[in-house]
């Protein structure tokens, strides 16, 4: 560990003016990303660093250019796809403890996308957990979230307001299949917009392949192949080429990233009906803003009740909130007698997080 460099950095040379916040934090914020000074490693660094532990392969968490990456074995294929052939990636199985500079580090399933991890850090009896992005709903394409006991929890709160409560994923899957069948009945192709890493595969897993052919946009197809290569079983799906668009007109379900709707790409499927799968579909106006005919409320992030339940399960008495509605969560945690603060990170570029958050969102269906 480069103690001298760390403490001589002007940002960290200040005296501790908050006596309740220990100076010896296991994780601090730097201009390169979240850093563990004791272990001399970064987490989801946004610039090049020597040793980068990656919670998952979404582009706001996994960036190219670091010397070494450490990630959960389940996510190696996907991280390789994103970081390039030459990246040095050290896989470790969930739950296995490794020592970095005397700090004990282990990865635990986060249930967000395939290979996503929470990171547990233990030093001198102090335990911190960095949740990364996570959800508590069932998802056949990745391992379920496991609560990890800790003293300090750094949690995401992308959907950290009481209005965000997800309905059962199997109900959403049934709605999507019914919409697909309805579109077929009127001779329309279905185009379902879903983030290409994670959401698209989760949607694919819920489709009834007996209804008709399933086609994937190129970006979705490549990542789906990486999922299949990692042993995840998914319904058969073809490539959304011009030929397939013609061949299966009015019958196919096409899965594409939301950006595809802003291009000429979608025109080859006309006539079609479009849908969006996102947690933001619970908020009035977001579906129209995306220009889609149908919204399906399906998120890979934790909803509000599950966020609070998770915090309880970890037994943490220090809660650090990052991405989303951080101020609201910090206020609530302090009211509940916990130590709490917000941490500014540069996460938030995954499709669901990139929507601008609104002060008082109105839920669809409410007056
Ligand atoms: Zn993510
Ligand atoms: Zn994120």
Image (cartoon, rainbow, N blue to C red):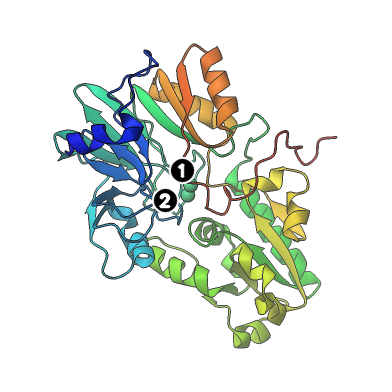
| CB of mark 1 near ligand 1 (< 8 Å) | yes
| Picture disc at residue 133 | 1
Q: Tell whether circle 2 marks a residue whose Cβ is less than 8 angstroms from ligand 2.
A: yes
| Disc assigned to residue 318 | none
Spot occupied by residue 298 in the image (x, y as percentages of width and height)? 61, 48
Q: Residue 32, image x and y in percent?
A: 36, 47
- Taking depth in this image into account, of 116 and 339 the one nearest to the observer is 339
Q: Are marks 2 and 1 in contact (CB under 8 Å)?
A: yes
Q: Residue at x 46, y 43 (%)?
A: 133
Circle 2: element type: loop
- Pick the quarter of the image with the N terminus: top left
- Count of picture labels: 2
| Quadrant, the C terminus | top right
Question: Does residue 234 appear to the left or right of 353 in the view shown?
Answer: left
Left/right of residue 142 with respect to residue 70 in the rendered view: right
94, 231: nearer the viewer: 94
Q: Which residue is mark 2?
A: 61
Q: Does the rendering let one see residue 285?
A: yes
Q: Which residue is farthest bottom?
A: 243
**208 to the left or right of 94:** right
Residue drawn at x 38%, y 44% as measured from the top left = 31
| Residue at the spot 56% in from the left edge and 59% down from the top edge | 195
- Please report whichever mark, 2 or 1, sits nearer to the chain's N-terminal start: 2
Pick whichever, 204 or 157, lies toward us.
157
Q: Element type at marker 1?
A: loop
């Amino acid at each position: 560990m480069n103690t001298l460099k760390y403490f001589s950095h002007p940002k960290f040379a200040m005296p501790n003016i908050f006596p309740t916040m220990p100076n010896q934090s296991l994780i601090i914020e730097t201009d390169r990303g979240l850093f563990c000074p004791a272990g001399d490693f970064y987490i989801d660094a946004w610039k090049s660093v020597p040793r980068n532990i990656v919670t998952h392969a979404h582009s706001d968490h996994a960036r190219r250019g670091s010397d070494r990456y450490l990630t959960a074995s389940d996510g190696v294929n996907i991280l390789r796809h994103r970081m390039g052939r030459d990246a040095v990636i050290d896989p470790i199985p969930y739950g296995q403890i490794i020592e970095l500079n005397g700090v004990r580090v282990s990865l635990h399933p986060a249930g967000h996308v395939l290979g996503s991890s929470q990171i547990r850090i233990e030093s001198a009896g102090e335990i911190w957990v960095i949740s990364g992005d996570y959800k508590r709903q069932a998802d056949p394409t990745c391992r379920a979230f496991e609560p990890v006991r800790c003293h300090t929890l750094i949690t995401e709160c992308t959907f950290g307001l009481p209005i965000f409560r997800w309905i059962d994923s199997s109900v959403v899957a049934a709605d999507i299949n019914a919409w697909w069948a309805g579109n077929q009945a009127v001779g329309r192709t279905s185009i379902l917009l879903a983030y290409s890493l994670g959401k698209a595969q989760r949607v694919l897993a819920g489709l009834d392949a007996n209804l008709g052919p399933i086609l994937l946009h190129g970006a979705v197809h490549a990542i789906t192949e990486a999922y299949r290569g990692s042993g995840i079983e998914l319904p058969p799906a073809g490539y959304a080429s011009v030929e397939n668009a013609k061949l299966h007109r009015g019958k196919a379900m096409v899965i594409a990233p939301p950006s595809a709707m802003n291009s000429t790409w979608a025109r080859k499927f006309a006539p079609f009906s479009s849908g969006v799968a996102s947690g933001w579909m619970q908020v009035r106006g977001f579906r129209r803003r995306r220009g889609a005919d149908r919204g399906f409320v399906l998120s890979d992030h934790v909803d509000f009740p599950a966020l609070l339940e998770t915090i309880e399960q970890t037994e943490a008495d220090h809660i650090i909130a990052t991405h989303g509605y951080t101020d609201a969560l910090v206020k609530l945690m302090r009211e509940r007698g916990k130590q709490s603060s917000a941490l500014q990170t540069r996460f938030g570029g995954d499709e669901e997080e990139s929507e601008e958050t609104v002060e008082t969102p109105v839920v669809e269906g409410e007056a």
